[in-house]
Image (cartoon, grey):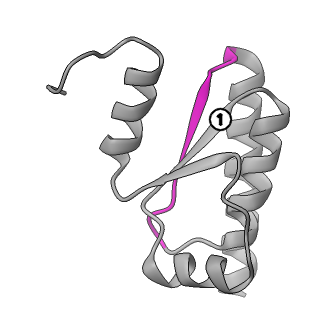
């Protein structure tokens, strides 16, 4: 039952995030995975965001999820991973020209 609830919550969050991409047209979208997360949800979001013109940055995936993604040969093409949300945000801001230099 808990697994089903978490899956439904992931779907709702994904739909909300994709709706926001359509409305705001960002160059980057950051997917924060702070409770483990599943590689299928990451892949689904990445593909959908890419189709909508947004590059997916993934932050905070667990070592277990990273290992599973390697085991099932998930392609890293189309997204970058970061250990911390602030690193993903810094990358997006620098790549967009909003933030410059080493200070953040």
Up-down relation of residue 24 to residue 7 (above or below): above
Up-down relation of residue 79 to residue 11 (above or below): above
Which residue is pictured at 58% across the width and 30% down the height?
28
Please give the range of residues in magenta: 24-35
Give yes or no for residue 32 being in the magenta stretch: yes
Which residue is pictured at 67% across the width and 16% down the height?
24
Instruction: Classify mark 1: helix, strand or loop.
Output: strand
Where residue 31 sits: x, y (%)?
A: 56, 48
Up-down relation of residue 52 to residue 57 (above or below): above
Q: Nearer the viewer, residue 18 or 89?
A: 89
Quarter-of-image position of residue 102: top left
Outermost residue, left direction? 103
Left or right: where 93 falls relative to 71: left
Which residue is pictured at 37% across the width and 47% down the height?
85
Q: Which residue is mark 1?
A: 55
Give yes or no for residue 28 being in the magenta stretch: yes
Q: Residues within 10 Å of mark 1 (few under 14, many from 20)?
A: many
């Amino acid at each position: 039952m808990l697994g089903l609830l978490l899956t439904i919550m992931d779907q709702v969050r994904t739909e909300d995030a994709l709706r926001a991409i359509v409305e705001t047209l960002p160059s980057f979208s950051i997917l924060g995975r702070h409770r483990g997360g599943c590689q299928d949800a990451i892949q689904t979001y990445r593909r959908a965001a890419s189709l909508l013109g947004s590059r997916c940055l993934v932050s905070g995936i667990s070592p277990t999820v990273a290992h599973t993604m390697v085991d099932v040969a998930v392609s890293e093409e189309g997204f970058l991973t970061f250990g911390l949300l602030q690193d993903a945000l810094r990358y997006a801001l620098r790549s967009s020209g909003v933030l410059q230099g080493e200070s953040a």
